[in-house]
Amino acid sequence: MGDIVYSLKNVVKHRIIENAGFRLCIPSIEIQAGENIALVGHSGCGKSTLMDMLALILRPDVTDQFEISPVGDKSHKVDKLWQRNKLDSLAQVRRHHIGYVLQSGGLLPYLTVRENIELPRKLRKLADDDSIISISRVLGIHRQLDKLPGLLSAGERQRAAFARALSHRPSILLADEPTAALDPISARKIMAVVMELIKGLKITLITASHDWAHVYRMELRTLDQKAGPVEGGRIYQSTFRD
Ligand SMILES: Nc1ncnc2c1ncn2[C@@H]1O[C@H](COP(=O)(O)OP(=O)(O)OP(=O)(O)O)[C@@H](O)[C@H]1O
Ligand SMILES: [Mg+2]
């Protein structure tokens, strides 16, 4: 058995307004270093909610255990950090170890592509080296570095978002429907490049996707997901488990 990067037990997040809404339940999830995981499920089942919690951006409401143990670092009790409002500590873990490709892309529109990709390195105070250009070359966006993101095609923007998520050499890559805006062939090509890029680096990849066929073809481990109405139909409850 390898090193466990994420260990979650009885984690719950409510999105409830006026007694009705959505509840995400995670009885138990363990994710090992270097695993490639897919969160698959229909729209609204809580994939982005779970991603945001794994990215340490969204605070869970209930936790028996929520630990992150990134490769090369100690174990962090995320539940305790949230309880003590240690936002700086959470940000530091995130900055060092996590790259996140948001569902919306998330590039800052007023920074060039190069500045966007550099940003996580600057936040981590990493020295300038040739990593920006080399990762951009691998992802095929090296000719776009001086443009603003608005001038890129949708596929180039997604590839730039991956470059930004990987530029500070995180050991955990979270990608929330990273290719949803693209045609299936471009989407699959980008994911193939990213999979090749992270192969052998022991990066843990967690991706949310609607594209079941692609997920199975890439042989990602999927988490079991079930959803349905509970409490007289007031709450729509979705459960993700190993
Ligand atoms: N900030 C929020 N406030 C209140 N409810 C929210 C919020 N964000 C999401 N929700 C609700 O939580 C549920 C899960 O949303 P989430 O975005 O996690 O789903 P998803 O599986 O990522 O969907 P999609 O495939 O469309 O991206 C939905 O019912 C959504 O309306
Ligand atoms: Mg989503």
Image (spheres, rainbow, N blue to C red):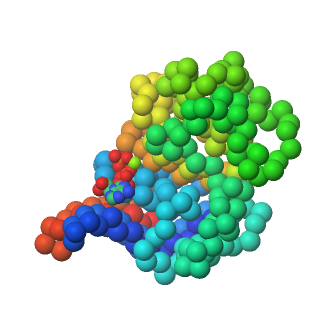
Residue that protrudes farthest toward the left in the picture: 232
Which residue shows up at 33% across the image and 64% down it? 15
Q: 18 and 209: which one is in front?
A: 18
Residue that protrudes farthest toward the front in the picture: 110
Q: 234 and 183: which one is in front?
A: 234
* Quarter of the displayed picture in which ligand 1 can be seen: bottom left
Q: 241 and 50: which one is in front?
A: 50
In this rendering, position of residue 91 left or right of residue 41: right
Q: Is residue 169 above or below residue 11?
A: above
Quarter of the image with the C terminus is bottom left
Q: Residue 110, how many percent across, how many down?
A: 60, 32
In this rendering, position of residue 55 left or right of residue 131: left
Quadrant in which residue 229 is drawn:
bottom left
Q: How many marks?
A: 0
Q: Residue 117, how many percent across, how many down?
A: 69, 36
Which residue shows up at 68% across the image and 68% down it? 89
Quadrant in which residue 119 is drawn:
top right
Q: Is residue 37 above or below residue 142?
A: below
Which residue shows up at 31% across the image and 48% down it? 43
Q: Residue 201, how many percent across, how many down?
A: 73, 47
Quarter of the image with the N terminus is bottom right
Residue 195 seen in the current view: yes
